[in-house]
Image (tube, rainbow, N blue to C red):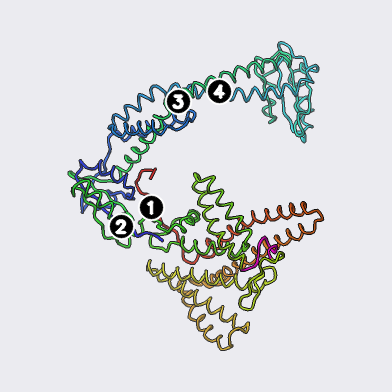
Amino acid sequence: MLQKMKRVQIIGPKEKFSRVVDLLYHEGTLHFEDACDCISCDEISLKKINAENAAEVPKALEKISVIFSTLPIVEEDSERQSLVHNELVEETLDQTLARSKRIINELELTTKELATRKSELSFTITSLKRYEKVIQTLEPVEQKLPIHEGFEVVVLLIQKQHNDVINLIESEIERITRNHFEMASIVTDEETIAAVVAYDNNYSQEVHSFIFSANVNEIRLPQEFMGKPFKDMLALVHQNLHEAIEELALLDTHLLDLSTKWYQELSSLKKILEDVNEELQIYSNAGQSEHCFVILGWIPQKFFKRTQNDLQTEFQNRVVMVDLEVTAKDLEHAPTFYDNPWFVRPFEFFMKLVSPPDSREVDPSPILAIFFPFFFGIMVGDIGYGLVILVFALLMKKKFESIEWLTQLMNILIISSIPAILFGFFFGEFFGNFGEMMGWLHPVQFLGITWNRAEAIIPMLILAVSIGVVHIFLGLALGMRNAVILKNRKHLAERSGMLLMITGLILLLVTFAGVLPENTAYPAAVLMIIGLPLIIFGAGAFGTIEVMSTVGNILSYARLMAIGMASVILAMVANRLGGSMEVLVVGIIIAALLHTLNIILAMFSPSLHAIRLHLVEFYSKFYKGEGMMYKPFKNGKK
């Protein structure tokens, strides 16, 4: 659910401003607004606060970050970093900037030169390896070429499918050089032919101009290679390559030495400067008069008292935080803050796929946390598959616990695997019909139906569509609730009319199917007659088209049956195919491979379809998503 937000104003003497900002930074609860823009000049005349050295901090941070990124990563020394951090915290901003400048002056030029040279050497090594490969390939054609002083050699790479251009190139170079050239070609791989041309270097400019205009891939050998046999070229390449690799190793050693000496201090300094830079950016959101400062922002209701008490305790009531009266216009700009229990929080990951909800809307996360695992479970519906997915998710979560987004996805799979196992008992499935074949379990009989998914096709279809009706009706009810909160009469009329119209259509359909008595058609017609003008009032004539769209949304839930049926049929094929093999081991391997494929599909396909049913069919009935996420000013490590 969304936490209620309070709009607050903090006022205090100007000399306390920096300390107040520090406290708010460590509290990590206030979402800042621009006080100068939000507070009328008639109420109080405010000017923006310009912090000293505000321009210097980002410059120093940028240079420190570049130096830090240039040095190789070494093992974190938490004790050393903590010591440096404590020293920096005790320093003034001027002292921290002076310390930064000293380090920059000592390291910036050196690291820049080392990084530049390292980049040059890396490029040189790549080029030399390329020359090495080309020369080794072309050695067999050396005897056909007059490689001596005064001649230049170029290598052209031509795709086999365009090998007819070799004759055209040869003809044109013959014309340009007045037949002072030799040309030979060799196949370098399955797709490429290398054409080697040696020509009088007096025609070099014209030849290269032609090659460029012909859009042919050219490898131009370095000048130092010219006039040498390929064997000598190759020796020179090896020598240059060896020297470049040795120099690169020396550079890496030098950089590692610098990193060993400076890494811990640079890491701590970078973090401190990032914190200071963030604080200084907040200064521009505050306002000041002749004697006091004013801060304006939003705080979740659950944090309000704590922040207020901490300000009172720290500043002995000289700094005051008050709760402002919030108007409907203010609420349009209130940030959105999720405050859900642990089992709902993983599903907030899916909320990142859409824009945040308005602070007055219903938070869909708890609903998603209920229906997503339910949909996933009914589509997977297998005890064995559910257990494998559960174990897989637990192992992946433990192995990659530092990757937050992956941990969230694994939490979703862990939660969703439970209903998959429960529905497996209901459908009597353990790796498809393997459990039933072994006599371990059988599909449950309920409402006179044996819920075997491979056979109970019509009951499963009715169940899936019925779930769709419940889900869509819930969405329409939430849309009505949001329309009331936002005081939007047209949306309220449209959603109400849609609910009545769809209810009437369903009653008519069930009546014609003979499930309900014939006289039920009259109240169904009344509901439709009432609903139609409400839809037209709320959405115009095109709103009637939306009725059929909503019916289509409901029918989309048939995928709950279709995906599940496809999964169980593939599982049965795996069992039957494995059992038909004369060699037991071969049968087990084949069945295991098919079940593995099915489990992989069971993790992805039901997840995608479950989230689609929410984002497309369900959210469209109530969700606008025009909110702004709550971004508190806080220490990033919190």
Of labels 1 and 4, earlier in sequence is 4
Label 1 sits on residue: 630
Q: Position of residue 129 (x, y in %)?
A: 66, 24
Q: Please report whichever mark, 3 or 2, sits nearer to the chain's N-terminal start.
A: 2
In this rendering, the label closer to the viewer, 1 or 3 = 3
Residues at circles 1 and 4 in contact by the CB criterion of under 8 Å:
no
| Lower position in the chain sequence, tag 1 or tag 3 | 3
Q: Mark 4 and mark 2: span between their CA atoms?
A: 57 Å
Q: Is residue 434 magenta?
A: yes
| Residue in view at x 59 percent, y 67 percent | 557
| Amino acid type at image mark 2 | Lys
- The location of residue 590, given as percent across then percent down, is 74, 53
Segment colored magenta: 426-435
Label 4 or label 2, whichever comes before in sequence order: 2
- The type of residue carrying mark 4 is Glu
Q: CA distance from mark 1 to mark 3?
A: 40 Å
**Real-space Cα distance between discs 1 and 4?**
46 Å
The amino acid marked with disc number 1 is: Tyr
